[in-house]
Amino acid sequence: MEESIKVIISGGGTGGHIFPAVSIANAIKAQHPDARILFVGAEGRMEMQRVPAAGYDIIGLPVAGFDRKNLWKNVGVILKLIRSQIKARKVIKEFRPDVAVGVGGYASGPTLKVAGAMGIPTLIQEQNSYAGVTNKLLAKQARKICVAYEGMERFFDKDKIILTGNPVRQGLLNPAISREDAIRSFGLDPQKKTVLLVGGSLGARTLNNCVMQGLDKIKQSGVQFIWQTGKIYIDEARAAVARAGEMPMLYVSDFISDMATAYRAADLVISRAGAGSISELCLLAKPVILVPSPNVAEDHQTKNALALVNKNAALYVKDAEAGGRLLDTAIETVQQAGTLNELSTNIARLAFKDSANIIADEVYKLAVNYKKEHGR
């Protein structure tokens, strides 16, 4: 008879952390329907809405990330960290998990630290090619470390590392819709080349500025754009489009809920270089121009991008150079069939096809061993 397990999954702050966490939870539930799963995130952050929408319970901690530019602000951060650890201990005592999973970001720190100190086995998932501060601190206590890139023994004990890739949103894979119908669903012309521009779930100022300043160029190019601005930029973007006049080759939205259809419509993608986005693009074999965000810890997005560029699996434009180069590069590249085919072939070679299930297997093994050791 299969053992029922209890799992805490902690982390979040952005969609890049939440989507993999939910994918892991879904894989655990698919394999072990009796499993009980509780998420622990950061109060006021995106996971507090997205996780319940996916069907899981979540508890928020008053945790905040460290400010690396203004050290004085960190006095309050430290106090929040202490309060978060106290609350995490209470949550763990009440829920009594058999294993704790950390998916990265500052939100996972207090929960995984406390779980490890209480003797509960922990597994961390490092999405990026350059390990984050939180995961490096948690690695000493972790029993298993699931990674998406080779060479991660630079940061972690090689005996703990499992190369799994990053879990992605399963709904993106194998869409039933054709490319032509996908393009029509955005009110665009299937006969024309189409570029999808996404700046992550929160949007990206640089990418949006490139489009707003290049609307005339887009109008004259004969190339279509599907443009996700992010919520805080949508009013500014729509105002710019209104000033530019009729733009039948442009679809603009603050958030595209059906990303499977958006990816299906795209001949070329422009994206930040977050680990989750890259993993999705690898699985979908999508040609991409990566514009790493400069506003991330340890400049990890540039390192993620270069891991692909060095294998001729993506194009790369620096954030500081995007204003002068990005649209020209996109419009030129999307019309070069040979380049698109080469990029698609090479990025597909980097895909991990069953990441969530592999991680779920490791989570289950840790939980069952813990239950046996403690007579649960």
Image: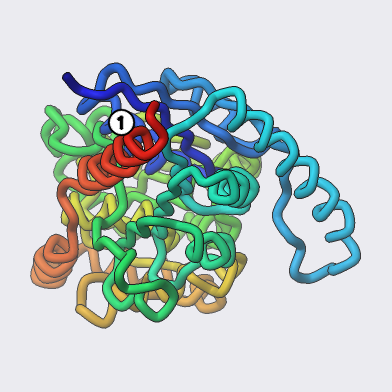
Name the image quarter holding the C terminus: top left
Q: Is residue 45 shown above or below 50? A: below
Residue 116 spot, x, y in % from top left: 54, 50
| Residue lying at 52% horizontally and 36% vertically, measured from the top left | 254
Front one among 54 and 340 = 54
Query: In the displayed structure, does residue 13 sit left or right of residue 191?
Result: right
Up-down relation of residue 347 to residue 356 (above or below)? below
Give the residue type at disc 1.
Gly
Whether residue 326 is visible here, answered yes or no, is yes
How many numbered callouts?
1
Q: Quadrant of residue 187?
A: top left
Image quarter of residue 184: top left
* Residue receiving disc 1: 187
**Crowding at label 1, few (<14), some or many (≥20) Cα neighbours within 10 Å?**
some
Residues 97 and 229: in front is 97
Q: Does residue 34 appear to the left or right of 312 in the view shown?
A: right
Judge whether 342 appears above or below 254 on screen: below
Residue 46 placement (x, y as % from top left): 58, 35
Picture residue at 31% right of the left edge, 41% below the top: 369
Name which residue lies at 65% across and 41% down.
232
- Report the coloring of the rendering: rainbow
Name the spot of residue 271 as percent of width and height, x first: 40, 58
Q: Nearer the viewer, residue 107 or 208?
A: 107
Query: Is 352 rendered above or below residue 339?
Result: above
Question: Where residue 303 sits in the image (x, y, percent)?
Answer: 42, 76
**Res 240 seen here:** no
Among the 4 quarters of the image, the one containing residue 260: top left
- Residue plotted at (71% across, 43% down): 85
